[in-house]
Amino acid sequence: MADLIRGEALAQDVWTWVKLPDSGEPVRKSAGKVVLFKLTGEPAAADDVIDRCEVPATGKVLIPLSVWLRRHEALAARMAAGEIGVWLDSHEEPAELADSLGGDLNRLPLIGVNFPKFIDGRGFSVGFILRNRYGYRNEMRALGDVLRDQMFFFRRTGFDAYLLRADQKPERCIAALKDFSTPYQTSTDGNVPVFRRRIGQKVPA
Amino acid sequence: MYRYDDYDRALVIERVAQYRDQLQRNLAGELSDDEFRPLRLQNGLYIQRHAPMLRIAIPYGMLASRQLRKLADIARRYDREYGHFTTRQNLQLNWPKLEDTADILAELATVEMHAIQTSGNCIRNITTDPFAGVAPDEIVDPRPYCEVLRQWSTFHPEFAFLPRKFKIAVSGTVEDRAVTYAHDVGLQLYRDDQGEVLVRVIVGGGMGRTPILGSVIHDALPWRHLPTYLDAVLRVYNRYGRRDNAYKARIKILVKAIGAEEFARQVNEEWQLERDGIATVTDEELALAAAAFQDPDAPARPARDAGFDEKLASDRAFARWVSRCVRAHKRPGYRSVTLSLKPHGLPPGDITSAQMEAVADLADRYSFGELRVTHEQNLVLADVPLADLYALWQEARKHNLATPNIGLLTDMICCPGGDFCSLANAKSIPIAQAIQAEFDDLDYLYDIGDLELNISGCMNSCGHHHVGHIGILGVDKAGSEWYQVSIGGAQGNTTSLGDVIGPSFAADEVPGVVKKLIETYVEARTPEERFLDTVRRLGVAPFKARVYGESSKKAEVTHG
Ligand code: SF4
């Protein structure tokens, strides 16, 4: 079982992470805004695959963006009950999620960002955008290839929950959140850049 | 020169601890080779053909003598008593042991050095003009900005796993000596009418498989916005750069795919998010960075020195060296000296531990204990009193550091190639040596004049062959080593990419080909023309005819 870290501690996971069924041949989107996916060569799920996705009827569920976009009306009641969280894959657009929520991401108690492979660093920017462009304040969870050696970066870009890959040791991952004491630059964490701290030392307030 | 404070020191020490743990997990089988790979690369460690290769960062090419001594010591104790300077102004050790690498990094940390982000798909060591701060044509000293950007880019949490490597170059001179048009991002610093420093931001240049010059996406960015604006550039690239094909993953491919204008628009939109935010650099912060790069406390000196003039007139070898290896300095009575790491017959850019120590001594005695690494793989003593040049030259000669060939054909840029690099299609060092042997006559070299010959062992173009006046590229044909030759490339203000002259050659043919190219030039040139100028005036055709004409049969054979 994968361990969940929330903040800096092991936590109970009450959410069911729902994934799309295996789609067979991927279909590439090619129109409108989605042209960007052509650039990165990302496959997008076909409608029938999305429709085949089984969402548990009760309890808290973390569902794919594509499922949310196609079924948000049917899921409205559960959404209102706080049972719906949405996750984005590394190539998916936070803007699409925001549009579907009238711009207010804080209606969601949980957003997940998937790291399909740990060398795929798009999720760090996705996290930054969710927090900074859309002002998302609730739980933001790193999913997928969530490994100890990226913990520091997850936290700094705005993640506050981490669903570890099954082979990871949670205590080592928690320790890795503090690999560095004072990073140079700012990010979602609002870290004061070291240059500013130095000035602070030189010019006492 | 920039000195660490407690913040910098803590970060490199924490980095060594982090890496040591990663290495131990890998050696213990807890961390797979696949997962260790990107982590070690971001610490400069490649696993190469013969052994690991460790690439040590020399931020924007500045080194203190005590650091060079440490490098000499490390090369002696952990390697084979030599290192190799690269076109990224870094130093590579070719034979360290994997198990020793954490200890080497710990040793480096004691002299404020590291191997952070010298490899891997992240923001690499930032490069600049090796004559920064001393060049007479300097408009803005780029080093404080480089230091601001070094700190901005080090362990940037959003950009540690980019689609591909990301290289930034900064220049602040009339004559661009940092190849800013051939980098992922090139930054040209200049001043407006009020003297305010602005930045021309160029993106999407690069060499490699798809050589292309960058496009200007912002012509007048106020300097204080550099970190936030570059965040925006990197964020757009991080999200939309291709990840399905390593050969198409550099930012240049993205910029080309959507167009520079659209890219600029997206960057601008993204920038609004952080613009004027906490990462905007203040005057005080820049002043703090600039304080590290004050001119050395050098006594004023007369503009002329009788002893120097006398030696210049009486000693032909010295005069020759001065003409090639000594440059003007912004202050009277001083000069900048390039120590050639291209002695004929030895691998370009290599330096032994003993030479490193000798250079460190020379730097202490003649140049305020500092030196610089050039992307042409030579070393520079930036602030040498005119009156000391003769003494310096005599000592440099003893250590084989005074080959008077800077800017000449034998001052080649050459990547490590197939002797060391596992990506290589072909060897490059033996080609350099064979060409040096062919052109060992100094008088002839001087007659040929300014000529940049660059050699890369594969399309990754570490040897910058695309911008060589003559470029040589190792290619693989049915498992054997061949060389493609191009002419007409250039760096600097008139940067251009060379044209391939035709089918490739076997290794032993290359010196002869270069010879024919040179002969064509010598016969066709006007008195004031450099090789490059003649190529630009006449085009490739006469050169091609000379090279292939006499051996058309051979050319057909090599076509296959
Ligand atoms: S150009 Fe190719 S062969 Fe040469 S160092 Fe770079 S990757 Fe290796």
Image: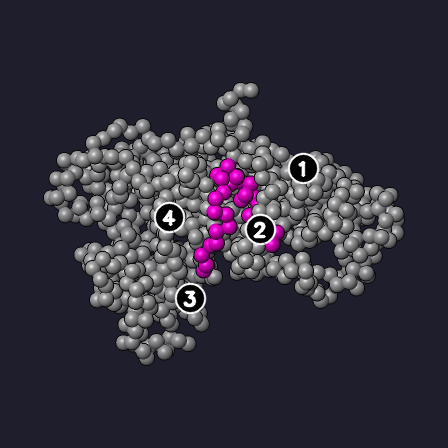
Q: Residues within 10 Å of mark 4 (few under 14, many from 20)?
A: many
**Mark pair 1, 4: CA separation:** 47 Å
Name the residue beneath numbered marker 3.
B475
Question: Residue A79 in the image: x percent, y percent?
Answer: 84, 46
For the residue marked with disc 3, what is the amino acid? Val
Q: Please, what secondary structure does the residue beneath circle 3 have?
A: strand
Both marks 2 and 3 on one chain = yes
Q: Is residue A86 visible?
A: yes
Q: Which numbered tag is attached to residue A174?
A: 1
Q: Residues within 10 Å of mark 2 (few under 14, many from 20)?
A: few
- Which residues are drawn in magenta? B211-240
Q: Which numbered tag is attached to residue B265?
A: 2
**Mark pair 4, 3: CA separation:** 30 Å
Question: Residue B112 in the image: x percent, y percent?
Answer: 44, 34
For the residue marked with disc 1, what is the amino acid? Ile
- Between B278 and B392, the one lying in front of the other is B278
**Mark pair 2, 3: CA separation:** 38 Å
Q: Chain of mark 2?
A: B
